[in-house]
Image (tube, grey):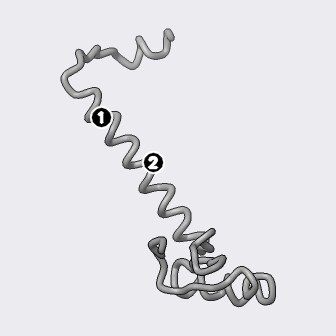
Amino acid sequence: MSRISASQVSSISELKRSPARVIEEASEEGAVAILNRNKPVAYVLDPETYEAMLDRLEDYEDMKKVIERQGQSVTYVTLDELDDL
């Protein structure tokens, strides 16, 4: 069985019957796993949780770039030199 990464679950049938209830649960709990035949097929997230996840992913990607670039030579420029670009 697939791992379910949410404290609340709902079936696709329930989502079709009462989408507002599932969205409300996501607002209260942070995420609702949508199941089809007892396997997660989607997650419903409140906007704040979704945006926080995107922010963390962006931070992670930025840190990967920093780590990859460590040890590379650095070129320093002045603000005036940047204006000329």
How many residues crowd around disc 2 within 10 Å: few (fewer than 14), some, or many (20 or more)?
few
Q: Residue 16 lies in what quarter of the image? A: bottom right
- Residue at the far left: name it: 71
Report the residue at 34% width, 16% height from top. 78
Q: Secondary structure at mark 2?
A: helix
Above or below 42: residue 11: below
Q: Work out whether residue 38 or residue 19 is closer to the camera in this orientation and state it.
A: 38
* Residue 12: % across, % down: 72, 80
Query: Is label 2 in contact with label 1 (beta carbons under 8 Å)?
Result: no
In the displayed structure, does residue 42 sit left or right of residue 81?
Answer: right
Residue beneath disc 2: 58
Count of all numbered marks drawn on residues in the image: 2
In the displayed structure, does residue 49 sit left or right of residue 73?
Answer: right
In the displayed structure, does residue 13 sit left or right of residue 8?
Answer: right
Above or below 37: residue 63: above
Q: Work out whether residue 54 or residue 4 is closer to the camera in this orientation and state it.
A: 4
* Residue 81: % across, % down: 41, 11
Report the residue at 52% width, 85% height from top. 29
* Residue 48: % across, % down: 55, 70
